[in-house]
Image (tube, coloured by chain):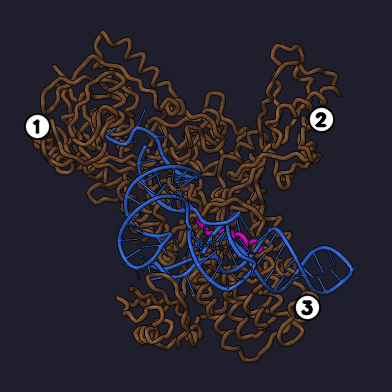
Chain colours: A brown, B blue
RNA sequence: GCCCCGGUGGUGGAAUUGGUAGACACGCAGGACUUAAAAUCCUGUGUCUUCGCGGACGUACGGGUUCAAGUCCCGUCUGGGGUACCA
């Protein structure tokens, strides 16, 4: 019987679904193991071959852990709120809910085909009201909390109100309360607090709430009509859609993630995540330790406060730079400079994010005309304005030390400001010396010290003189939480007398209202405002009209899987205590500074309020590499007719093959020929032919050769296209390896492979491609290798006679022998079990498949079809290729699913050879190999080697200086 | 610029703590079976040299440590990812 994967796979998928083979039990004696995949956004393109890469890996681990006696939770769901469905709705009018449901159905169908062991009873969808009810509920908890710096955790806002009632508030005296000393909030007493009206109280509390409404500079994307978080912007344009982004001051819901900066940093040390990912988070949080320092403005009692990490270089300060947005800019500017400063500030404000990045090397700035006094020397130092200083970081002002900071250096060079060396070691003619090592000079009391010691002493001195104090700054910004979009969770807030109130728990979920259009309103209000006439709290109060960002639903979904259908709490405490946290989390590294930071933030918050016990969402995390697509390009001729009277529209569309792209004469001949048919004469003269390239659907391309007919039918305007082909008549496309995306027409779906070779082959092949964490382009060149491995395995069980049929021609009935295995067969088996176990434990799936292949090759060579060997082998293989192993297991006469069987243990005893081949080398050079009994000790091996004739011959009677026997593997003599 | 991770045959990639580099697979070449094809099986396949046995060289490049280096250290080149005026 042939290996009929289609029938086998659909049968077993039906069996697993019917018997709920992979449903996780909440509790029991077995140890728990939680394996989580990052759930997908269900896009219209369906699953591509990159999605299953991580899912297959996690599925292998899940199945393996079940074999090993763990109670495994392995769920899947959908991150189903998002922009593409909404953009589609704007274009077509189709409700995003319908689009999303269709896409989910397709994803589900594709996933089912691959044979994953998900517990589908626990499926979650972030756009389901039963789910986002709890996302809203968590938002309300965050809204109703503040961060207490002295207990270092979030607490209910009532505890803060109590403090206000009894002690009032004064930021000058008590910065433990706020955790945010930049906030200049007027002090008040307890009595005053009690006398404040509700609006005033609300406004004050807003400064402390962890979810707050605040005015801040946001990244505004006009094309998308919404604000974006920093991690949603790449290279100054929106990550989705690639639209320009501007900076804009807006009143926005935000999350005070900065309160957790230090804990998010510290938590990283406890996690088994890759160094590069932890490093990315550390950089994103961007902790820097330094000091604040006040510079008094000359002839004034006002001061400018700066933040610096290099207080040691304070004697090198030759100017002070303010950000254009700095509050003192206007008051500092002297009359002479007013015009220039105002022009500069206006220009800087209007520059978009992208322009700022483009001009990154352009140095701009303007002198205010004012001076500060140097706090130690008393010298007058000019105050400048420069847009290299960011308003949002530190104090928005820096002390410029051009000798030891490259940005200050360029600024000083450009404007001819003095450069004062205070640390020895660099060549200041050429560049600044930024390194934090060397001896201090020109620095009064710091002279002669090393940088490290000078920093300490400088801070000490600054604190004694009350000029400032040691301080820590973070790059991390609060996360903007509102989006002016339709397809997201409504923020459960309504406004009464201009005061925001959270909904009560029993009023949730606040369901997304229906709207007639998905666009913003004519006056720029978010789409939800379209429903506002009928969508009101208690029929009269406006709800918040912005919705939550994409990361809201994904910041806690791992908890919902623990208790996916609970209607009364977000998940039962007992179940969360049981499942705790994710043991293994697999997903893409593109979420390093977005999702993975937010989910850690929410986890820590929920722990602070005592809802959960885990401090971190996932113990171990693996980033699967990206599977890149192979894009193909066609090259379209650009007409450059100069002054010619010919109308370009009458000319044909011509595509030029890659190989002849630079052969001008060749192209010219063909162009002339083509134009003849149009009765057009090409204007004379030497000319080059420029082309523009664009992506062509890879389905029309085979080995870079374009299927011209298919291509012509692709789009209406290509119907009449002409092609300048290679000499051999082919049209060759350009090639590039890049990210798979619908817009590049290079998406490879798993469906074709599953159709042609089966899901088990697909699973093996995706793992066989290379290390899980490595990015690699998709190519199917080697797929026959893993497929024939499965066929070989099948044939071990189907043989007409003892000894096994090795040819397709003599395939017969199922035939497995009950005779005793030989020593070498046992060795093959146990060697394989050992290696596979080690491979899975260290997530090295590609090598384990190689080890299976070696095993099957050896058993085929030995003509081994013995039950005692094949059964354990099947169990080992079943996490990788579940369908074929289930089928063979059943045919061996077992009634239960193979996934319920214990994983075999290996026995070292079978692995020891009777004899070992010792390579004998002299000074590291291999001379000969010596076969000795395996039972010998290291000393005995040494003695045997020395007794040996060949050794004596090599040594010519001399004694070696030393003899090294390494790991019973190699003998080396040093002469 | 800064941070992180890589660079091994024609290709994808193996190589626990430094211990016989190139496992396994693809591709290629030759062969078997077949009227033929497909399928399957066998042999060879890092480079140079030799009819062969064998020998020499070989993990981006240049140094170093070591009896022994793909692996450790220093420098250079190079690919990928992250981040970008963060003071």
Provide residue A634's location: percent of width, then percent of height: 70, 36
Residue labelled with disc 1: A444
Residue labelled with disc 3: A811
Q: Chain of mark 3?
A: A
Provide residue A721's location: percent of width, then percent of height: 79, 31
Residue labelled with disc 2: A720
Counting residues from the N terminus, which is met first, the one under dot 2 or under dot 3? 2
Q: Main secondary structure of the magenta part?
A: helix
Q: Chain of mark 2?
A: A
Front-lying residue, A546 or A853: A853
- Circle 2 Cα neighbour tier, 10 Å, few/some/many (<14 / 14–19 / ≥20): few
- Mark 2 falls on what kind of element? loop
| Distance between mark 3 and mark 1 Cα atoms | 93 Å
> Which residues lie in the magenta part?
A761-773
Say if labels 1 and 2 share a chain: yes
- Circle 1 Cα neighbour tier, 10 Å, few/some/many (<14 / 14–19 / ≥20): few
Compared to residue A654, the image places residue A457 above or below, namely below
């Amino acid at each position: 019987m042939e290996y009929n994967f289609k029938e086998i796979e659909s049968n077993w998928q039906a069996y697993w679904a019917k018997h709920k083979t992979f449903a996780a039990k909440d509790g029991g004696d077995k140890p728990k193991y939680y394996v989580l995949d990052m759930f997908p956004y269900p896009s219209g393109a369906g699953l591509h071959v990159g999605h299953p890469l991580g899912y297959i890996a996690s599925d292998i681990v899940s199945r393996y852990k079940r074999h090993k006696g763990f109670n495994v939770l392995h769920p899947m769901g959908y991150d189903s709120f998002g922009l593409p469905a909404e953009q589609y709705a704007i274009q077509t009018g189709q409700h995003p809910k319908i689009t999303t449901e269709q896409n989910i159905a397709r994803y589900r169908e594709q996933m089912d085909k691959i044979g994953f062991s998900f517990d589908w009873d626990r499926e979650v969808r972030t756009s389901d009201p039963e789910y986002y009810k709890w996302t809203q509920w968590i938002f309300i908890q965050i809204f109703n909390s503040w961060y207490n710096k002295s207990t270092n955790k979030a607490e209910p806002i009532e505890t803060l109100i109590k403090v206000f009632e009894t002690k009032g508030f004064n930021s000058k005296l008590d910065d433990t309360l706020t955790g945010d000393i930049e906030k200049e909030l007027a002090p008040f007493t307890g009595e005053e607090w009690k006398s404040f009206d509700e609006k005033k109280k609300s406004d004050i509390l807003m400064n402390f709430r962890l979810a707050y409404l605040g005015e801040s500079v946001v990244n505004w994307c006009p094309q998308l009509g919404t604000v974006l978080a920093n991690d949603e912007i790449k290279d100054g344009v929106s990550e989705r859609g690639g639209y320009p982004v501007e900076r804009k001051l807006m009143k926005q819901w935000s999350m005070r993630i900065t309160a957790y900066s230090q804990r998010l940093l510290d938590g990283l040390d406890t996690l088994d995540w890759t160094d590069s990912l932890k490093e990315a988070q550390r950089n994103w949080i961007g902790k820097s330790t330094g000091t604040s320092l006040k510079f008094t403005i000359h002839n004034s009692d006002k001061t400018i406060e700066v933040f610096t990490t290099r207080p040691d270089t304070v004697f090198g300060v030759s100017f002070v730079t303010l950000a254009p947005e700095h509050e003192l800019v206007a008051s500092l500017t002297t009359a002479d400079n007013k015009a220039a400063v105002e022009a500069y500030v206006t220009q800087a404000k209007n520059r978009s994010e992208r322009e700022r990045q483009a001009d990154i090397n352009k140095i701009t700035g303007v002198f205010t005309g004012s001076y500060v006094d140097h706090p130690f020397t008393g010298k007058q130092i000019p105050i400048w304005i420069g847009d290299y200083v960011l308003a949002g970081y530190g104090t928005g002002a820096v002390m410029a030390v051009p000798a030891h900071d490259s940005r200050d250096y360029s600024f000083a060079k450009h404007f001819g400001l003095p450069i004062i060396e205070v640390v020895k070691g660099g060549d200041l003619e050429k560049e600044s010396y930024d390194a934090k090592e060397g001896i201090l000079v020109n620095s009064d009391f710091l002279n002669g010290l090393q940088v490290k010691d000078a920093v300490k002493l400088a801070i000490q001195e600054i604190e004694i003189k009350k000029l400032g104090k040691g301080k820590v700054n973070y790059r991390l910004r609060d996360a903007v939480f509102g989006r002016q979009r339709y397809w997201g969770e409504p923020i459960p807030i309504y406004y009464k007398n201009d005061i925001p109130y959270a909904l009560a728990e029993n009023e949730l979920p606040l369901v997304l209202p229906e709207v007639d259009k998905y666009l913003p309103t004519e006056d720029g209000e978010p789409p939800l405002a379209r429903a506002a006439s009928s969508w009101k709290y208690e029929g009269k109060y406006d709800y918040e009209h912005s919705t939550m960002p994409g990361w809201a639903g994904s910041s806690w979904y791992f908890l919902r899987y623990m208790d996916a259908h609970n209607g009364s709490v977000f998940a039962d405490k007992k179940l969360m205590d049981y499942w705790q946290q994710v043991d293994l989390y697999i997903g893409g590294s593109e979420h390093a500074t977005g999702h993975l930071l937010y989910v850690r933030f929410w986890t820590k918050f929920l722990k602070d309020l005592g809802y959960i016990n885990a401090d971190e969402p996932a113990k171990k995390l693996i980033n699967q590499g990206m599977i890149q697509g192979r894009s193909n390009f066609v090259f379209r001729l650009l007409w450059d007719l100069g002054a010619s009277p010919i109308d370009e529209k009458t000319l044909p569309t011509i595509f030029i093959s890659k190989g002849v792209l630079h052969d001008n004469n060749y192209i010219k001949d063909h162009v002339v020929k083509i134009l003849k048919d149009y009765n057009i004469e090409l204007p004379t003269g030497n000319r080059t032919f420029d082309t523009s390239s664009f992506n062509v659907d890879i389905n029309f391309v085979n080995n870079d050769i374009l299927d011209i007919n298919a291509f012509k039918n692709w789009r209406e305007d290509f119907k009449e296209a002409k092609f300048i082909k290679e000499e051999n008549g082919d049209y060759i496309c350009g090639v590039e390896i890049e990210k798979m995306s619908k817009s590049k027409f290079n998406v490879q779906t798993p469906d074709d492979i599953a159709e042609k070779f089966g899901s088990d082959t697909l699973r093996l092949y995706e793992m066989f491609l290379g290390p899980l964490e490595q990015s690699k382009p998709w190519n199917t060149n080697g797929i026959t290798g893993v497929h024939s491995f499965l066929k070989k395995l099948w044939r071990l069980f189907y043989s007409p006679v003892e000894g096994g049929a090795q040819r397709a021609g003599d395939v017969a009935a199922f035939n497995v022998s009950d005779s005793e295995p030989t020593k070498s067969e046992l060795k093959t088996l146990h060697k394989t079990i050992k290696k596979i176990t080690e491979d899975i434990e260290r997530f090295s799936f590609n090598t384990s498949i190689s080890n299976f292949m070696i095993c099957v090759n050896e058993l085929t060579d030995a003509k081994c079809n013995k039950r005692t060997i094949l059964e354990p082998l099947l169990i080992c293989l079943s996490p990788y290729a579940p369908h074929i192993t289930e089928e063979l297991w059943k045919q061996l006469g077992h009634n239960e699913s193979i996934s319920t069987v214990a994983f075999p243990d290996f026995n070292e005893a079978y692995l020891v050879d009777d004899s070992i081949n010792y390579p004998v080398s002299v000074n590291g050079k291999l001379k000969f190999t010596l076969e000795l009994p395996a039972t010998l000790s290291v000393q005995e091996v040494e003695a045997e080697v020395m007794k040996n004739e060949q050794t004596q011959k090599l040594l010519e009677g001399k004694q070696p200086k030393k003899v090294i026997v390494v790991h019973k593997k190699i003998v080396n003599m040093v002469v």
